[in-house]
Amino acid sequence: EQLANQIAAGEVVERPSSVVKELVENAVDAGSTTIDVTIEEGGLSLIRVTDNGGGIEASDMQTAFQRHATSKISTSSDLFRIASLGFRGEALPSIAAVSRLTCVSADSNGGLARRLVIEGGHITADEPANAPQGTDMSVRDLFYNTPARLKYMKSIQTELGHISDYINRLALAHPGIAFTLKHNGSTLLRTMGTGDRLQVIAAVYGTSAAKAMLAFTDSDSDYELTGYTSKPELTRANRNGITVVVNGRYIRSHAVNQALLQAYHTLLPINRFPLTILELGMHPGLLDVNVHPSKMEVRFSKEAELRVLIERAVKATLTAQRY
Ligand code: ADP
Ligand code: MG
């Protein structure tokens, strides 16, 4: 069992940002409206994610850290459940196998919090605690017992870059959640959770970027599309400023990028890319998730139709602004 968890950890927990991703997605899934992420030394000495979500019931605490323990199989946000196939219910035991983890959680059951400590996969404490509703996960000394993995870690700046990029995009995907990201004591991101996406764009990319954004929205019988894209004057040298959100999850899609660029194609020189946050809503059945889950790449079953919609919506906005 412990070996199985360490093997699974090799797939789920590639680097500190994978831990952040799993913990923060759990916090989102728990219905949190506030999620605070605290990092030390690029995540190698500490990754702490605190949320105010539904919490874990005291009697479920140990179960949550067993393999294939998931409480989510039948929830409506099934999209990324499908994407996570194989990782389902594997994140917490995998993380706990390769770190010193402390989980304090309380559900709505009035102060019956529980504190669970797991070191290298072994439970070293399980006791009652005092805590407000929500979950507080601290992951210390990641990979301390898997030196081979530790050796592959890049610099603190590189690992932090991955974490920061991920939190930025998640904040863009969830303007209704207030996020903070702190590294070694300094605040790198703070969003308000008001639901206003332009506010998040300002927090992530700066106020002048937010002012240069154009809203677009459109739909057809299969897809709901909304988002913001930059005026052609404000472009970037790479695609990293394009964020695609599908049914509330941040994903990557070559098809979406292509359609977006097609809308700009007479306006932008080659190798310039708009800053864009593009959100799609659709029936989960329209999504093929046949690619490696951790890369977040998805395919759409009606891709041609989707491309037409995106190009049309973005072009309409640009044209209305006389571009
Ligand atoms: P999965 O997310 O695929 O269900 P995980 O190993 O990530 O598997 O988590 C196991 C279970 O622990 C979840 O299904 C959920 O019930 C519980 N859990 C984990 N993190 C949280 C959290 N922040 N708030 C509430 N419940 C959580
Ligand atoms: Mg999870």
Image: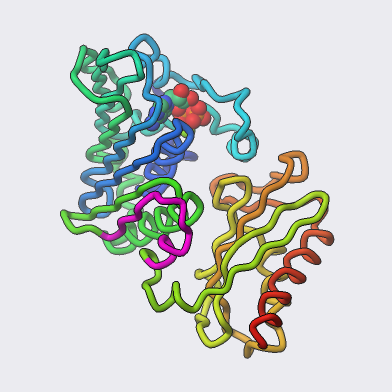
| Span of residues in magenta | 188-202
Residue 1 location in percent, x, y? Answer: 43, 18
Q: Residue at x 29, y 27 (%)?
A: 120
Residue 23 location in percent, x, y? Answer: 39, 38
Magenta highlight on residue 269 = no
Relative side of 210 to 295, left or right: left
Q: Nearer the viewer, residue 85 or 255?
A: 255
Residue 44 location in percent, x, y? Answer: 26, 47
Q: Nearer the viewer, residue 238 or 51?
A: 51
Q: Is residue 5 visible?
A: no
Q: In the picture shown, does residue 112 fall above or below 223?
A: above
Q: Nearer the viewer, residue 282 or 147?
A: 282
Q: Nearer the viewer, residue 112 or 147?
A: 112
Magenta highlight on residue 199 = yes
Residue 79 location in percent, x, y? Answer: 64, 39
Q: In the picture shown, does residue 120 fall above or below 297?
A: above
The image quadrant that residue 65 belongs to is top left
